[in-house]
Structure formats: C-alpha cells, structure tokens
Image: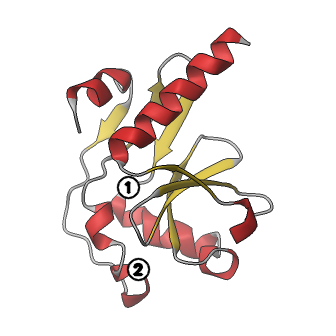
C-alpha cells in the first residue's frame, strides 16, 4: 500500500487478521490476491464506506452468497456496507457488483490493484460530496 492510499484510509479501522488460514481448493486460485488485503471497515474519504471481510470469513461469505452460482471467476472480499459487493477476478482486477441481481453482466472492473481500488472509492466519495 502506498502512502497516498494510507492517507485515503486514515479513518479505516483495520483488523490484523494475517493469521494462518486455509482456503479450500475452490478458492485457492485467489490466495495470492487475498494475502495483500487487511480486513476492517470505515470511511474512505468523506462519503465512501468500505467493509473488507476477514480472511477467515471470505470463503464462508462467498459460499453463503452462492457467488460461484452467479459469477464466473470472481471472489468477493467485501462491500460498501449496503447493496454493492467488491471482489477480485482471476486476473487480480478489483470489481464491483450489486448483491441483488448479482450476475456476470453486472460486474464492473474498477481497479487493477489495491491502491487503485482505494483511489476509486475515494473519488466516488468526492463526487457524491459535489452532488
């Protein structure tokens, strides 16, 4: 995480969950992308909220939301605390998709890495503030 990203996450409450965790074969292909994440929740800028699920909960929540039935090659990692889910595809791109109506056609790539993901959320918050 670069220093600019850290500034944008200044009120984000991180939970250190870099504990040993084991993903099933179904999710093992995402392991490299998940190891760079921290879980937590909080504001990103003035008007964007982010919840990043803990490593131990990612697999269970993806199963609970039946993600593999609705999305292809995507694992969800969190949400905006409301109706928008955030995830990572097999190429390591960050995506957003609504929880209700979750479908491959609704997936939008929003960033190529974690720093861009945070910048995207930060810029959305700034746009909301102007409206």
Tell whether label 1 touches label 2 (CB within 8 Å).
no
Helix, strand or loop at disc 2?
helix
Q: In front: 106, or 52? A: 106
- Which quadrant of the figure contains the C terminus? top right
Considering every residue shown, the one lying at the far top of the view is 130
Q: Quadrant of the N terminus?
A: top left
Q: Is residue 10 above or below residue 25?
A: above
Which secondary structure, mark 1? Answer: loop
Name above or below for residue 112 compared with residue 105. Answer: above
Q: Position of residue 118 (x, y in %)?
A: 42, 36
Position of residue 62 measured from the top left corner of the image (x, y, whole percent): 54, 70
Percent x, y of residue 81: 61, 41
**Rendered view: 80 above or below 124:** below
Whichever of labels 2 and 1 marks the residue nearer the N terminus, that label is 2
Provide residue 65's location: percent of width, then percent of height: 64, 69
> Residue shown at 19%/68% (left/top)?
20
Q: Residue furthest bottom?
A: 25
User: Separation of disc 2 and disc 1 at Cα?
Assistant: 15 Å
Of badges 2 and 1, nearer the viewer stands 2
User: Which corner quadrant of the image does residue 4 belong to?
Assistant: top left
In this view of the protein, which residue sits in the foreground, 127 or 78?
127
Taking the image as drawn, is residue 100 in sight? Answer: yes
Residue ID for mark 2:
27
**Left-right relation of 56 to 101:** left
Circle 1 crowding by C-alpha within 10 Å: few under 14, some 14–19, many from 20: many
Residue drawn at x 51%, y 58% is 87
Q: Residue at x 20, y 61 (%)?
A: 19
In this figure, which residue is indicated by the disc labeled 1?
A: 54
Is residue 30 shown left or right of residue 104? left
Q: Nearer the viewer, residue 66 or 71?
A: 71
Would residue 103 be seen by someone viewing this image from the given angle?
A: no
């Amino acid at each position: 995480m670069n220093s600019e990203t850290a500034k944008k996450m200044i009120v984000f409450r991180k939970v250190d969950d870099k504990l040993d965790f084991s993903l099933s074969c179904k999710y093992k292909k995402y392991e490299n992308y998940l190891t760079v994440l921290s879980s937590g929740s909080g504001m990103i800028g003035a008007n964007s909220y982010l919840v990043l699920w803990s490593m131990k909960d990612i697999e269970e929540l993806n199963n609970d939301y039946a993600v593999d039935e609705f999305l292809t090659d995507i694992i969800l990692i969190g949400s905006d605390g409301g109706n928008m889910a955030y995830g990572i595809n097999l190429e390591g791109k960050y995506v957003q998709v609504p929880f209700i109506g979750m479908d491959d056609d609704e997936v939008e790539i929003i960033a190529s890495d974690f720093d861009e993901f945070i910048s995207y959320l930060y810029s959305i918050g700034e746009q909301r503030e102007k409206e």
